[in-house]
Image (cartoon, helix red, strand yellow):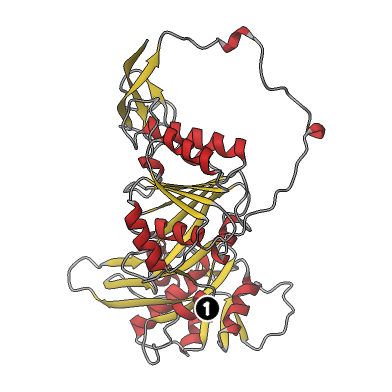
Amino acid sequence: MAKLKSVYFCSSCGYESPKWMGKCPACGEWSTFVEELVRKDTASKQEDTRSFGEVRSEPVTLSEIKAEELPRIDMDDGELNRVLGGGLVPASVVLIGGEPGIGKSTLVLQTILKLSGVKSLYVSGEESAGQLKLRADRIGIQNDDCLIVCETNLDEIFKHVRKVSPQLLVIDSVQTIYSEVLESSPGSISQVRECASLLLKFAKQSGTPVLLIGHITKEGSIAGPKILEHMVDAVLQFEGDQHYMYRILRGVKNRFGSTAELAIYEMNRSGLREVSNPSELLLTQNHDGLSGVAIAAAVEGVRPFLIETQALVSTAAYGTPQRSATGFDIRRMNMLLAVLEKRAGFKLAQKDVFLNIAGGLRVSDPGMDLAVISAVLSSSLDMTIENETCLCGEVGLSGEIRPVHRIEQRIQEAEKLGFSRILVPFNNLKGFNKKMKIDIQQVKRVSDAFRLLFS
């Protein structure tokens, strides 16, 4: 006979406890335990594994295991294929997370609509069939191989799967799915963990890849237990500012590819468009004669692109100067301002400094440092940087310009877009013997770069 029991789960790691605790003994987080009701079957007890009874699986040696390289599923999306590592691996589970309204459902729906010859089942737990039809009409793609069902009960979903036998299963979203085995509400720690575990078991046994769409918390992490990210094969983060048109898909975890890749999309009325060459879109080319603008040759993952860095330096109107950065780490900007004041002799302690990465992108490449301090100094001196000049280099605390990775790709990207000069760190060109039309100038210190830019 089944009875209800109150159990506490850690919302960070999923640790189970019979009572509430302030600090989780598993992950060390504070105030993360939530109470949930679960159904315990007291009539039928499972066999104790310590009795060493008969087991179903048998241990084998590595030489006895046959490893077959299964062909990946081409998603008909060059950007998504690159992030996935070359396509979708059969029997894999991919989790796509992002803020509300960022375009997760649009990205997945238009991707499976473009898959011709691949039967897919799109399970929607948030939208009705009519709403999905309106979105598909807006995207403008028709595909009879894509089947839509609106269901949140996991047992009913598996009934549809056995009836349809899809080659690709999409769950939108995993926080809305529930299992009748548990009494807790959909989206709870136990429900998300149980449903994800059953979907993972289905994918591995049937060989059907599963795409899970997940919500994120206000801190930016995937909602639900942290074990959800450990269970799946790949975690993709879909991010971007809703006030800008660009969206970035990053690989946070990928068992079948690199996590250094990213994909850039442009949001428009007909869905998401692939941005194959983001440098041309991120450069406005209308800053002729304007100070405070520097072009950086950045790299995100293994993909180089040129991006416009904007800075504004003005006298502080109040006692405390303001420091603001959009798309760039504010702590790193404060460090660069300290380097400017200590090593280059520019007094910015009584100045307001505002920094913006154009296009609404968030870049974490340390090779942006030289462009950031050059834009700040350009605005402070009210002197312009030549339009056909771009920069790359990491700035150290002693004012030296440190080498950056993938320098060859940065230089080739700058030459391809018509830039005539690029400033690179000294001794960063070892082994680079290719003749380029662009003028490559090496700099050792911050003062050397300023002398070349503003002399």
In the image, residue 386 sits, relative to residue 22, either above or below, namely: below
Residue depicted at x 48% and y 41%: 229
In the image, residue 115 sits, relative to residue 46, either above or below, namely: below
In the image, residue 446 sits, relative to residue 96, either above or below, namely: below
Residue at the outermost right position: 63
Which sits in the foreground, 153 or 182?
153
Which quadrant of the figure has residue 245? bottom left
Element carrying mark 1: strand
Which sits in the foreground, 189 or 212?
212
Whole-percent x and y of residue 1? 37, 10
Which quadrant of the figure has residue 317? bottom left
Whether residue 100 is visible: no
Residue depicted at x 46% and y 9%: 44
- Give the residue number, with chain letter if any, for mark 1: 391
Whole-percent x and y of residue 144? 50, 58
Residue at the outermost bottom position: 289
Residue at the outermost left position: 318
Left or right placement of residue 160 versus residue 341 in this view: right
Whole-percent x and y of residue 212? 46, 46
Number of residues whose C-alpha sits closer than 10 Å to that of mark 1, classed few (under 14), some (14–19) or many (20 or more): many
Q: Amino acid at mark 1?
A: Leu
Residue depicted at x 56% and y 58%: 83
Whole-percent x and y of residue 210? 53, 45
